[in-house]
Image (spheres, rainbow, N blue to C red):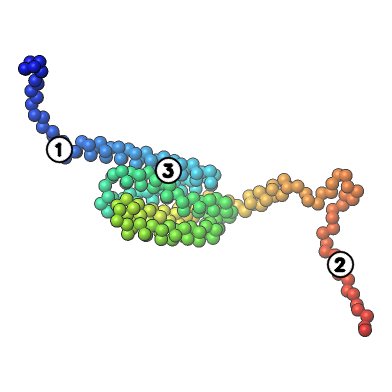
């Protein structure tokens, strides 16, 4: 105890060993990795459920999910080759990657599931219905992402590159990968089932020619066009 009742404590100097923040960096990397993987898996599961509801075909749903996974691996691999490191922005972009990748494949899968005929006929019908809209959507999205590449802020530049790569790869895998798989092992739907569905719909529809029970004339109305009589004019 020193003068005035104060207690003096002598503490030796402490030397920090983590001068460069390695442990903080490792902890942040663990958080980024966990959040990115969790967000990507949740997005894939949601896309799987949406595709199953739209198509009602497990095979088409699995092929669509495979296309989404290929898009995700291509974008992540190409950005890693470009020197990107896992950070806050990259973790967020990986989490929303599956949502961007499902756009084109779900349209083609829905068009294929609602067509009839052999595999080749269903592929042609799907491309005839949704080929042009999907291509137009890809072109407009690419054009919308190009101005982001000229931004000076890193966030907008990386988001533009990420959006551009995701759109291009998702369109390529949806048109050339997904549809090629369906052309090889995709399910076929005969046209007899389409006629049966139409017959069931017609059977359940009310008969417009059925007369009202209280009416006098119970016969169906005449649907024949009225006869045309030629009228001759008297000469003046």
Above or below: residue 67 compared with residue 231: above
- Residue sitting nearer the eye, 190 or 174: 174
Q: With 14 as the anchor, is 222 left or right in this view?
A: right
* Labels 2 and 3: the sequence-earlier one: 3
Residue 145 placement: quadrant = bottom left
Mark toward the viewer: 3 or 1: 1
Mark 2 to mark 3: distance in Å? 66 Å
Residue visible at 41% across and 58% down in the picture: 144
Q: Residue tagged by mark 1?
A: 19
Q: How many C-alpha atoms fall within 10 Å of the one at disc 1: few (<14), some, or many (≥20)?
A: few
Q: Residue tagged by mark 2?
A: 227
How far across and down, in percent of the image, does residue 69 sit? 39, 47
SS at badge 2: loop
Q: Residue tagged by mark 3?
A: 44
Residue visible at 42% across and 43% down in the picture: 44
Q: Quadrant of the C terminus?
A: bottom right
* Labels 3 and 1: the sequence-earlier one: 1
Q: Quadrant of the N terminus?
A: top left
Above or below: residue 48 compared with residue 181: above
How far across and down, in percent of the image, does residue 150 sit? 32, 59
Dot 3 and dot 1 residues touching (CB under 8 Å): no
SS at badge 1: loop
* Labels 2 and 1: the sequence-earlier one: 1
Q: Residue furthest bottom?
A: 236
How far across and down, in percent of the image, does residue 65 sit? 44, 46
């Amino acid at each position: 105890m020193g003068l005035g009742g104060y207690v003096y404590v002598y503490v030796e100097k402490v030397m920090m060993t983590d001068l460069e923040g390695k442990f903080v960096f490792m902890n942040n990397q663990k958080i980024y990795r966990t959040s990115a993987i969790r967000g990507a898996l949740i997005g894939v599961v949601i896309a799987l459920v949406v595709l199953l509801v739209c198509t009602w075909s497990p095979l088409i749903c699995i092929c669509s999910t495979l296309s989404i996974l290929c898009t995700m691996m291509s974008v992540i691999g190409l950005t890693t080759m470009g020197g990107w490191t896992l950070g806050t922005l990259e973790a967020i972009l990986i989490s929303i990657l599956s949502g961007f990748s499902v756009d084109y494949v779900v349209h083609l899968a829905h068009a294929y599931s609602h067509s009839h005929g052999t595999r080749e006929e269903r592929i042609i019908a799907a491309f005839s219905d949704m080929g042009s809209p999907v291509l137009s959507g890809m072109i407009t999205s690419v054009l919308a992402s190009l101005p982001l590449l000229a931004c000076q802020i890193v966030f907008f530049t990386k988001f533009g590159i990420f959006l551009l790569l995701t759109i291009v790869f998702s369109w390529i895998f949806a048109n050339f990968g997904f549809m090629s798989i369906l052309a090889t092992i995709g399910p076929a739907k005969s046209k007899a089932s389409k006629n049966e569905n139409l017959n069931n719909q017609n059977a359940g529809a009310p008969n417009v020619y059925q007369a009202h029970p209280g009416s006098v004339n119970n016969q169906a109305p005449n649907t024949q066009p009225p006869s045309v009589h030629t009228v001759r004019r008297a000469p003046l």
